[in-house]
Amino acid sequence: MDEYYFIVKITVSGRRFFLIWNAEYESVFLTDDKKDILVFTNLFNLTSYAKTKGIDLDYRITPYDLDNITVTVETLDCKEIVEKWNIISDLALTAGLEFSGEDKRYNAIYDKLFFGCNLPTMKHHSYTPEWSAEEIAEINRILAEGAELCRHVLM
């Protein structure tokens, strides 16, 4: 079975980090022999590494800006939040760290966000979630925790 590798750029604390994400199995980032996530500070080093290891990359870069994560009812973009939530979950999984976004008590919030993405493959009418102040606060808390987790892992 072919494996699919993608370039992810995470911006946190004003710094850019490049990682290789493997979409197979559990959606994890590439690690070294010590199981530390491979983190590159520039694209050249990442692509050079991939070439020496024979890794077939998809060269489209998927960016995640974790410096601008605070949302309000007016600015909440379900797709953007779900994408950030998912990439933080994958980073936590790869690093063996806990992320409260994976806690079942937040499933209802995640589900509202997910269905609010209105993905073309979903067979439902357009859905625009309504958010309480408490839910917005929880989303902001989860994203802030995720940004801190990324700082811990990447810096």
Image (spheres, rainbow, N blue to C red):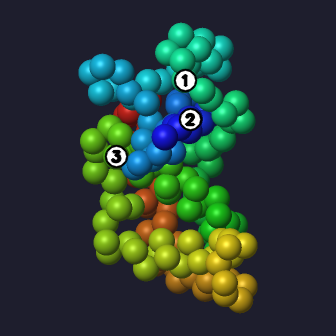
Query: From mark 2 to mark 3, how far is it between C-alphas?
Result: 17 Å
Which of 41 and 74 lies nearest the eye of the viewer?
41
Q: Report the residue at 68% width, 73% height from top.
A: 121
Mark in front: 2 vs 3 = 2
Up the image or down, 124 lies above or below 27; here it is below
Total marks shown come to 3
The x, y position of residue 47, in whole percent, is: 62, 18
User: How many residues crowd around disc 3 within 10 Å: few (fewer than 14), some, or many (20 or more)?
Assistant: some
Q: Is residue 137 visible?
A: no
Up the image or down, 71 lies above or below 34; here it is below
Residue 5, label in figure: 2
Residue 93, label in figure: 3
Label 2 secondary element: strand
Check disc 1 and report the residue beneath it. 55
Q: Report the residue at 34% width, 46% height from top.
A: 93
Give the side of residue 154 with respect to residue 70, left or right.
left
Query: From mark 1 to mark 2, how far is it between C-alphas?
Result: 7 Å
Say which label, 1 or 2, has the lower sequence index: 2
Give the side of residue 141 with respect to residue 72, left or right.
left
Q: Is residue 106 visible?
A: yes
Label 3 secondary element: helix
Say which label, 1 or 3, has the lower sequence index: 1
Which of 87 and 150 lies nearest the eye of the viewer?
87
The answer to whether mark 1 and mark 2 are in CB contact below 8 A is yes
Q: Report the residue at 39% width, 61% height from top.
A: 101
